[in-house]
Image: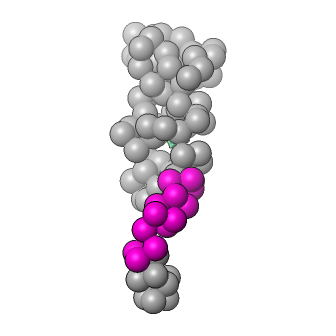
Amino acid sequence: MSVLQNAVKTSEGVSLNGFLLSPVVEQCSGCDRVRTFEEQDFCSSYPNPGSKWTGGRCNFATHIKTQTAAAAKVNPLKASKRAAKGR
Ligand code: SF4
């Protein structure tokens, strides 16, 4: 995992280009955009990863598509149920 570049530690927290950063949330684990800084994980694309997940999954997540594809493969029953529902 790479280190977050250009990040600085301020009295208010970790800041990048003037944005205060919040650490990544649980759902981010496995995403390629996660960067570490001062032993915490941050997103290289969003200052506030939690908000990227409040309305569903993060549209920049790199780890989700692969997981869904793999899940569909190992679980054909669920996939066919979904298909039967017309989704
Ligand atoms: S791109 Fe989305 S899923 Fe990936 S670390 Fe950032 S907020 Fe999390």
Q: How many marks?
A: 0
- The N terminus lies in which quarter of the figure? top right
Question: Is residue 81 visible in the rendered structure shown here?
Answer: yes
- Give the vertical position of 42 relative to 39 (above or below): below
Name the colouring of the figure: one colour
Residue 82 visible in the current orientation? no
Residue 62: % across, % down: 59, 45
The residue range painted magenta reads 65-78
Instruction: Pick the residue in front: 58 or 72.
Output: 72
Q: Is residue 33 above or below residue 74?
A: above
The residue under the point 54% across, 11% down is 8
**67 sits left or right of 12 in the view:** right
Query: Measured from the top left, where is residue 82 in percent x and y?
Result: 44, 80
Residue at the far left in the pictured view: 26
Residue 74 in the magenta stretch? The answer is: yes
Indicate yes or no whether the magenta region holds residue 68: yes
Q: Residue at x 56, y 53 (%)?
A: 66
Q: Report the front residue among 39 and 10.
A: 39
Q: Is residue 22 left or right of residue 47?
A: left
- Per the picture, the main secondary structure of the magenta-coloured stretch is helix
